[in-house]
Amino acid sequence: MTKKYSLDKIRCARNEFEALLRIQGISNFKLCKIMGVNYATSKKYIEDPTLIRFIHAYRLSVFMGLEVQDIVDTIVYDLKQN
């Protein structure tokens, strides 16, 4: 858990992908650096993670030390909830 994000901010995340980012301590600015996209695009990815391209999910998974499938499963989880 990071000092930047409290449990309250993680609980009120818009989706599971955003919650995963907050748990890992990844801000919007840091996400755009990791993925290699601009700030507006990373903001769009947080709001609607289904727009994320495979290469960006791969870069994020390498940074976080996860498998790409873990990122995909997080995104699919929200689709099943709706």
Image (cartoon, grey):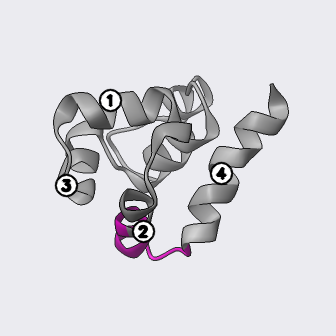
Q: Is residue 64 magenta?
A: yes
Marks 1 and 3, the one that precedes in the sequence: 3
Q: Quadrant of the C terminus?
A: top right
Residue 32 in the image, given as x and y percentages of width and height: 22, 46
- Tag 4: residue type? Thr
Q: Are marks 3 and 4 in contact (CB under 8 Å)?
A: no
- Residue numbers of the magenta segment: 59-67
Which mark is nearer the camera, 4 or 2? 2
- Residue bearing mark 1: 43
The picture places residue 23, in percent across and down from the top left corner, at 49, 49
In terms of sequence position, does the residue under pointer 4 or pointer 1 come before the other? 1
**Which corner quadrant of the image does residue 29 belong to?**
top left
Q: Earlier in the sequence, mark 3 or mark 4?
A: 3
Q: Measured along the vertical axis of the image, is residue 70 above or below residue 75?
A: below
Crowd rating for badge 4 (residues with CA inside 10 Å; few <14, some 14–19, many 20+)? some
- Using residue 15 as the reference point, say whether residue 53 is left or right of it: left
Residue at image location 48% in from the left, 38% down from the top: 51
- Residue matched to label 4: 74
Q: Report the residue marked by disc 3.
A: 36
Label 1 CA crowd tier, 10 Å (few <14, some 14–19, many 20+)? some
Q: Residue at x 24, y 58 (%)?
A: 34
Mark 2 residue type: Tyr
Query: Which residue is nearer to you in this view: 16 or 72?
Result: 72
Q: Is there a contact, CB below 8 Å, between mark 1 and mark 3?
A: no
Measure the alpha-carbon separation of dots 1 and 3. Answer: 13 Å
- Which mark is drawn over residue 25? none
Q: Residue at x 32, y 29 (%)?
A: 43
Q: Write the residue at 63% across / 46% down.
A: 75
Query: Is 77 inside the magenta-drawn segment?
Result: no
Mark 2, other Cα within 10 Å: few <14 / some 14–19 / many ≥20: some
